[in-house]
């Protein structure tokens, strides 16, 4: 068990103080669970028929502050089961907890007392409310929660709070949370018209509008462009396969619960939860020689996982997951060179997004104390780990060696990127795999004319497009860089008489492959500019009398007026920035 | 019933003559079915335990020729059922046919007699074998066929023949067939390494290698490039949806048997058999105004149909069908302009492939005698048919009006192209649809501020990539035009010492986006050239002492030596041809 931070004791103790405040108002309240959680705490209450609204929260907060100032001590004491049952026979919640402890073979029941309040609790807690900063916490929301998380049980009332050591940390957290809410990709996705869901299609199955598809395709094209320089070759596979494919690969075990079954009249299939097994079958479709290796397959394709309806949300967890997948089949001697190439692709791709630099790399290796947890020959492992270490050294990746984080089939390099809200995301990965080629009996003829097993390198650059776009939307708050923006230029004729020239400009831009749109609505210029800004369009072109006469355009960015240019000059400027 | 061509009588009569020849050899033979078919005829025989091999065919042919020369008459006569039963009580096949005629309420049993041979047959036949050209037919193959097509029944022996009016026609047919076999996309697909199948993935689910994927992606990019000029916008949808989506669209009825069911733990879906219903949901994700229309969605995406295992073959009939789909949502007034744009896209796309010109267009309209077979208002239909007629006139499509060929939901323009073997394929289509927008309750606000229903135009340019590529592979016999070729240039160093310069050339070409490969095998130059030609590579670059010294390259096409050029000049030449 990891050491409990003091702030966790504070959070847990605040949940007790909150229960004191609630019980003062509702003496008959029943207490469900009430743990410390990330950034705060909560407590479930059975308030019988009483319904409380968020208006009660400031009142409770005030009372908790008063309690804190009273320097109340938290004192633990144990009871025998008989005594505990007797004392709380009228309380079905405490009785349930006591039953539970007994079933688990505990010898005693632990209680914490603070002033008049006694709660069944294993602790630990702060010694006294003196340790709690009365300005460091806030009650944030009320929600319904089923007793024991089971919808057949009674719905309890859950009150959430957050708590930190200082008022400053609390403020910072609240500000960051507000910013995150503003940037929420579900909210922005709707406002910017990027993707939508349809009940008739189903939950977790996003429909990508033309604008959202621009984002996807721009990312995909950039990936292709960078990857082709390193000899990656696109391939194409279907979305279903016989279950036998995954029994052979081992995914049928691993993803058993997440496999969608596909039932036809003549055959049964499953929807692919991953792409590597299909790619092995392309490798296996021809005899291969060492001269053919490395073979580097890549593909952006949808895979399907049967996620729980309750866990589906926005783009973060979907059932149709578009992955940027890639598999390299090579000889053991080629591992280092191939891994280096992937690392270079990762660097180039993330540099386009301005994310390279704000990251760290994990060299995930075996747990030396648990060598049996891994598949493959120890000699291969040592060689592979050493190669990845050399890749890190050669390319100055400064990878942090993390023991026990390797995949069961091989070591890997994982890239963790930081977004503009300071959140960390594991995105790119380079994984060596000695096991799958053996499972599928893949072969090549080596220089000596003997049969040998290739090594497989799994690589992802952006991972899942859906998750990646959720992150990017929030990272950029929808204000994408020019090359990625669904609409790059919005043309705003001041009045109807300027529409004709505006349309000429539109055609000139579109003819050069610039994604431009025109706003010919009857709104005034102010409203048109506001609308373009809400859409986070990188550039606006205002077209009025002056522009029509001079045959120029006046360019405004999201923040400032850039200047007036001829159309030709404008196109040059934009194309240069897009490059 | 359509008029029977004389050649069909010849074919049917030849099947009787073949049975005479067979019965001379095997007097106890039982006769199954024996119809005239396209280009020829067949007859099923119960030979008891006798197994015959193709060596018998020339012998049978010779005997048939002798019979033809005997000027044998074909004479029909009818029998009462009692008489027929009595005469053939020993023959289970004839007894079955007599039963069948009786069940169908026939009054008499029709027989045809030629010389000593009598066969139960409705006819008609030639009057005499004089009408048959003894040099116009050929027996082609022997196959097994279950009696009544049911695998629970006895396996009979089927002999196939082909027959034409003249020896020349027969030769032409055989030559074309030989050519078609050489060009068979399944054979070429394997030889050129374009696609493969895996038992573990399943039948009808092609895996596209890097080379095959180049073909797909080049076609897709060309389509995108042409379509974007006309304002088509790519969208992205998942491959599954709730069944309700297809109940609403009507496809659940139409494709009931071909729907793959998708079973999850929490929800049931089906794999999409078409894409239009998903696209309606993107349209419906926002309120739309007349100012937003037309909205033109396009997507290359896989749809799935549960085809019968016996009907699956190569790329012609697959279960994972990648369609180039497109749907335009517009006002009724925009139908003409939008249809014209699609017609222009079709022209431009097929011109890239050299197929435009060898085609005809069908204006498929209602059957005037059956107005109830169609959905929608007659006024809308008239307007739409007139618009398509105007499109044909304006663009000089010279569309042939074909009554009764409209879809139930609207009239259409179908493009039928002819390949290099003279075969016709219906590929591109422009279909007006008044019904689906109503079924999904799609709306827009018109100029008057009222709710109105948009019209939907379904359009396909190439249809299914799989079927299209099967046709293209056979049309080009694998020798694709330069822009489409998976490998555009093969570099052939004469010996090992030329490899270094060859690799420089490779890098220079690849750096300019030219798909080049190098052959560094230990083979001699002759073998390397042969291999490149088998792969149908458009250009070869031979690199020897002369080239290394002069820093030039010598370019050879599939058929001739083109000349020697500097690398820079070569790239210019190739890029120009690709354009």
Image (cartoon, coloured by chain):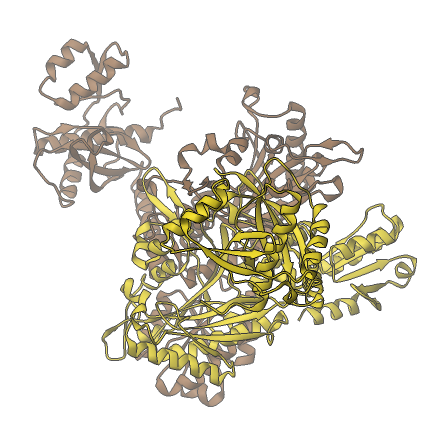
Chain colours: A brown, B yellow
| Relative image position of residue B128 (x, y in whole percent) | 61, 64
Name the foreground residue: B14 vs B508: B14
As drawn, the residue found furthest toward the bottom would be: A549
Q: Quadrant of the C terminus of chain A?
A: bottom right
The image quarter containing residue B285 is: bottom left
The correct choice, above or below, for A453 with respect to B103 in the image is: above
Name the foreground residue: B268 vs B406: B406
Q: Residue at x 49, y 58 (%)?
A: B77
The image quarter containing residue B136 is: bottom right
| Relative image position of residue A346 (x, y in whole percent) | 58, 48
The correct choice, above or below, for B408 with respect to B344 in the image is: above
Q: Quadrant of the N terminus of chain A?
A: top left
The correct choice, above or below, for A1 with respect to B167 in the image is: above
Could you tell whether B259 is left or right of A408 in the image?
A: left
Q: Residue at x 56, y 78 (%)?
A: A569
Q: Residue at x 76, y 43 (%)?
A: A291
Name the foreground residue: B164 vs A460: B164
| Relative image position of residue A213 (x, y in whole percent) | 45, 60
Could you tell whether B374 is left or right of A248 in the image?
A: left
Residue A520 visible in the shown view: no
| Relative image position of residue A570 (x, y in whole percent) | 53, 76
């Amino acid at each position: 068990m990891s050491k409990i931070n003091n702030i966790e004791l504070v959070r847990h103790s605040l949940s007790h103080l909150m229960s004191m405040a609630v019980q003062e108002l509702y003496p008959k309240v029943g207490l469900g669970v009430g743990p410390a959680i990330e950034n705060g705490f909560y407590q479930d209450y059975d308030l019988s028929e009483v319904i409380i609204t968020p208006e009660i929260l400031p009142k409770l907060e005030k009372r908790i502050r008063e309690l804190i100032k009273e320097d109340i001590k938290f004192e633990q004491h144990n009871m025998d089961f008989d005594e505990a049952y007797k004392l709380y026979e009228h309380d079905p919640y405490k009785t349930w907890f006591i039953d539970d402890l007994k079933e688990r073979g505990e010898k005693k029941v632990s209680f914490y007392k603070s002033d008049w309040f006694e709660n069944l609790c294993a602790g630990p807690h702060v010694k006294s409310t003196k340790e709690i900063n009365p300005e460091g916490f806030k009650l944030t929301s009320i929600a319904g929660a089923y007793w024991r998380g089971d919808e057949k049980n009674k719905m309890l009332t859950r009150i959430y709070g957050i708590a930190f050591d200082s008022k400053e940390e609390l403020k910072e957290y609240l500000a960051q949370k507000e910013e995150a809410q503003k940037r929420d990709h579900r909210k922005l996705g709707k406002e910017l018209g990027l993707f939508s869901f349809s009940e008739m299609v189903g939950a977790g199955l996003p429909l990508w509008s033309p604008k959202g598809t621009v984002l996807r395709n721009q990312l995909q094209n950039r990936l292709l462009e960078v990857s082709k320089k390193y000899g990656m070759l696109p391939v194409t596979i279907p979305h279903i396969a016989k279950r036998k494919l995954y029994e052979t690969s081992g995914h049928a075990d691993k993803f058993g619960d997440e496999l969608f079954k596909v039932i036809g009249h003549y055959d049964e299939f499953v929807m692919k939860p991953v792409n590597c097994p299909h790619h092995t079958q392309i490798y296996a479709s021809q005899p291969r020689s060492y001269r053919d290796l490395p073979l580097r397959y890549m593909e952006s394709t949808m895979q399907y996982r049967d996620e729980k309806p309750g866990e589906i949300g926005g783009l973060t967890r979907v059932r149709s997951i578009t992955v940027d997948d890639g598999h390299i089949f090579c000889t053991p001697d080629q591992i280092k060179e191939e891994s280096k190439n992937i690392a270079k692709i990762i660097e180039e791709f993330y540099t386009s997004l301005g994310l390279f630099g704000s990251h760290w790399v994990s060299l995930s290796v075996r747990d030396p104390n648990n060598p049996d947890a891994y598949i493959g020959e120890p000699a291969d492992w040592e060689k592979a780990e050493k190669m990845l270490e050399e890749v890190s050294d050669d390319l100055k990746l400064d990878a942090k060696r993390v023991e026990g984080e390797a995949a069961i089939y091989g070591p890997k390099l994982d890239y963790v990127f930081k977004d503009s809200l300071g959140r960390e995301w594991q995105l790119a990965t380079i994984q060596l795999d000695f096991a799958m080629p053996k499972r599928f009996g893949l072969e090549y003829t080596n220089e000596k004319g003997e049969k040998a097993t290739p090594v497989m390198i799994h690589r992802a650059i952006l991972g899942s497009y859906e998750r990646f776009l959720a992150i990017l939307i929030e990272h950029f708050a929808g204000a994408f860089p020019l090359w990625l923006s669904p609409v790059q230029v919005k043309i705003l004729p001041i009045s109807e008489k300027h529409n004709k020239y505006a349309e000429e400009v539109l055609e000139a831009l579109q003819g050069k492959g610039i994604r431009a749109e025109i706003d010919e609505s009857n709104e005034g210029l102010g409203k048109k500019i506001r609308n373009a800004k809400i859409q986070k369009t990188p550039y606006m072109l205002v077209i009025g009398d002056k522009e029509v006469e001079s045959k120029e355009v006046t360019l405004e960015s999201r923040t400032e007026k850039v200047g007036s240019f001829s159309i030709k000059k404008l196109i040059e400027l934009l194309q240069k920035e897009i490059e």
